[in-house]
Amino acid sequence: MIAYHLPILQIVVPLIAAPLSAFCRRAGMAWYLALIICAASFAISVALLVRVLDEGHISYLLGNWAAPWGIEYRIDAVNAFVLLIISGMGTMVLPYARVSIADEIEPHNQALFYTCYLLCFAGLLGMVITGDAFNAFVFMEISSLATYVLVALGAKRDRRALSAAFTYLVMGTIGATFFVIGIGLVYMVTGTLNMADLAARLQGLEQNRTALVAFAFIVTGIGLKLALFPMHLWLPNAYAFAPSAVTVFIAATATKAAVYLMLRFLFTVFGTDYNVLGLTLTYMFTPLALAAMFAASTVAIFQFEIKRMLAYSSVAQLGYTVLGISFASVTGLTATMIHLFNHALMKGALFMAVGAIVLRHGAATIDSVRGLGRTMPWTMAAFVAGGLSLIGVPLTVGFISKWYLVAASLESGRWPIAVLIVLSSLIGVIYIWRVIEAAYLEKPPEGRTAREAPLSMLIPTWGLVGANIYFGIDAELTSRVAGAAARLLLWVAP
Amino acid sequence: MSDAGLLTLSLLIPLAGALLIGLTGRHPNLRESVTLATAVLLFATVVALLMRLNAGALPAVVLHEVMPGLSLALAVEPLGMMFGLIASGLWIVNSIYSIGYMRGNKEQHQTRFYICFAIAILAAVGVAFAANMFTLFIFYEVLTVSTYPLVIHKETPEAKASGRTYLGLLLGTSIGLQMVAIIWTWVATGTLDFTKGGILDGKIAAGVAPFLLALYMFGIGKAALMPFHRWLPAAMVAPTPVSALLHAVAVVKAGVFTVMKVAVYIFGVDFLARTGAATWLMWVAAFTLLTASLVALGKDNLKARLAYSTVSQLSYVTLGAALATSMGVIGGSMQIAMHAMGKITLFFCAGAIYTATHKTEISDMDGLGRAMPFTYGAFLIGALSIIGLPPMGGSWSKWYLILAAADTGHLIMIGVLMVSSLLNVAYLLPVVGRGFFAGSDAAPAHGAVPAAGAQVTTGSRLRRIKEAPLFCVIPPCLTAAGCVVLFFYADRLYRLLEPIAKP
């Protein structure tokens, strides 16, 4: 019984818990509630992934309304994997968030923080799990609105969080509007909103102008949401000024959900046969991805605040993700899928380490990390490990991602791209090393009290560092799931 | 113990050593005993593996499958055996030397130093016994990262700048070029296992083979092929034991060893010879070989001169690989061993001179030889081996390389090798000459022995001797003796290496 309803429980549980936590008077209670709910969601997504890997796809009809008319939740290896990433990261962040949030947010807002957190969490999961295009838009809005609030809550530490949240709000709304316009247009052409049904009915409409315009609107709208270069301008400030725990959470999940939607629309709904798809991938995605990899990485070198630096690095990493999409091959999409997971792990670990520094020193800049190698050894060691993973040193997850990406580009015969991939990852060495040098080779400023971050932050951080290394050494599971997802997207038999 | 167990043990021993060194950091004597014990145990393990190999076994073990089709695996073959023996054997001698040097110079952060050293040796053994290119690459990177803290050991601005060059070039070339080459190989052949005769034959077009080879050769930054050699002189800022074992033996030899492995087991000598894919490499190696020697001539800093000498000598190995003939492979591989023994001796001596007198510039070292006869004696033997004069081991590798050049009809390479030997004479022997003959006996130039300067002038000949601490003097004498021994027992080495050269 429960097993049958797992798909809906995945969404409904956090969605119902969100208003409940608003009633909690004390932040501690809200935190407990959020933790239990997220952990339960994580368990559900693990169960779903196991079932999907065993049985193929799961189709769940909301209220038992038959598929093209009612809303269908359709889970296969692709979204089961993304659900796992989102719910896993959402759960990992909570133990970490408690101390950090207590420090960074006004006391009377803390319970509300967990409400927004759960809403955002539910929204992201909903975007991914649903098989209905309009439903995806609804959940996208739920998660986005919650995210704007979460970012704005950083205002206690830095007032600029407000303007960052506002920019994000404007850009995010434009993105969502484009997306919904696109959906409206395809609905006009096909009369359906169910993704599987859409895919079937769009066959033979290659020359239909409305469908073409819809395609453009949808790709641009999602592109804005996933911070596709040069539509990434909202991202660095939002990441930099949001409370640390929020940064960790949205960096690890929000753009991943958007990438998932992109994959779904490009490959499942429009499909590889759609004639403009190839053109879009070759002439839009490839150059934009390469530009993101180089421009954003280069900008990252010149950042003084470490959160901003990592935010630019995220834009560059999204470039890798999009580059994988642009190959439209099994290896390329495997690279994208596996990088979604791996990037969540590495950026999660890095932002967590930076958040710990913010907690102890009020800010994380190249200046404030001086000498931290001695005063916060565990935090800095986690940063180094996460940094090595970001660079793509072997035995970390970053290496696995890079391996698949380079293999995909060589396979498609585009070897200059392979060279560009590794060159851009070398830029990562420069900005990561600036921090490491400051932390380990410079003397701490006078009069600083030496204190390591609390265990409640260190343990999740090191949990992620451990995952970075574990999945870097044993990538069997992740490559199998990512490979299965890639084949599903391309309609290739396993 | 089973072959596989023994092979795994060769990685576990230095790992356990690194952990124990960390735990015993507060008790220097205990810590150094751990280092020495680990080194001896490791060497014993490698020797045990050698005996298995000689008995006809080929120990191999798959440690772990990382991605489908790509595993961390170890396997012993002759070339790796030789490298493993050198790295682990010289680690013992070097550990003795480190103790003398680090204590003599009252260096900071000694625990970190010994931990990183043990990890670096772990990585070197991993490179030596890697069964496929993937495993080799991983240990290659571990070696880079673990030696970085050793390079910046002094934490001065100069050390930091050098550390940047070091890491930038080594990571840059390996991730930027070598990794692409490896993935290319994987995409083309579906395997990365080191296979006799190579894996690329028939899998890639002869026309693109030179490009793939270029990605490998320049990607193996540790082989210090110009223009990616700058990291090696930069690394000289490290304490001398690091320069001696790592930047004359483990790290750089890991580089040229990888070059040999790629030539023999990935491309295959026949494939290289048939397609002529390595012809360009021969010229680049020859250029590096001569240019680095010329640069060395102009260096007054002893360690810098030795560093450029290393750059030059490494290219002998690359040249051996590029000649793509069995003699070249034997000569190049022998050079790995011969140069290791010779160059570590020279670095030991440079460190001993520094420990005793705190001098780094050759022009300040006039007359020092009379005060430090053992050190300078060892230096002379090491230098002769590098030059390639009998009865020192270095002569054999040059012999086989010249044979290979003659064999393949590249007579000009014989000329290159001869000119290089002359250049070696020109930059190495003056150091010895100045030490023994320059400066007046009555007043050592520039106060060569500052602390004891006053009484020395009136003392007897014996009392004038002012050597470095015993722990710094015995190791160079041992390795100098090793250079001579290698000359007389080169046939053993030849027989060990013979199987890889046979088709």
Image (cartoon, rainbow, N blue to C red):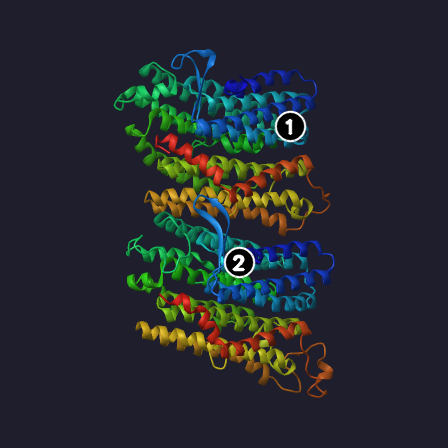
Looking at the rendered structure, the secondary structure element under dot 1 is helix
**Tag 2, which chain?**
B
Read off the residue under disc 2. B3
**Residue B122: image location, x then y, percent:** 57, 57
Evaluate whether residue A83 shows in this view.
yes
**Residue A37: image location, x then y, percent:** 60, 23
Amino acid, disc 2:
Asp
Alpha-carbon distance for marks 2 and 1?
A: 63 Å
Q: Is residue B90 above or below residue A332?
A: below
Image quadrant in which you'd find residue B414: bottom left
Q: Report if the CB atoms under discs 2 and 1 are less than 8 Å apart.
A: no
**In front: A466, or A208?**
A466
Q: Is residue B417 above or below residue B172?
A: below
**Residue A60: image location, x then y, percent:** 46, 18
Tag 1: Cα neighbours inside 10 Å, few (<14), some, or many (≥20)?
some
Image quadrant in which you'd find residue B465: bottom right
| On-image quarter of the C terminus of chain A | top left
**Tag 1, which chain?**
A
**In front: B350, or B98?**
B98
Amino acid, disc 1:
Lys
Looking at the rendered structure, the secondary structure element under dot 2 is helix
Read off the residue under disc 1. A156
The residue under the point 54% across, 46% down is A388
Callout 2 and callout 1 share a chain: no
Tag 2: Cα neighbours inside 10 Å, few (<14), some, or many (≥20)?
some
Image quadrant in which you'd find residue B206: bottom left
**Residue A1: image location, x then y, percent:** 53, 16
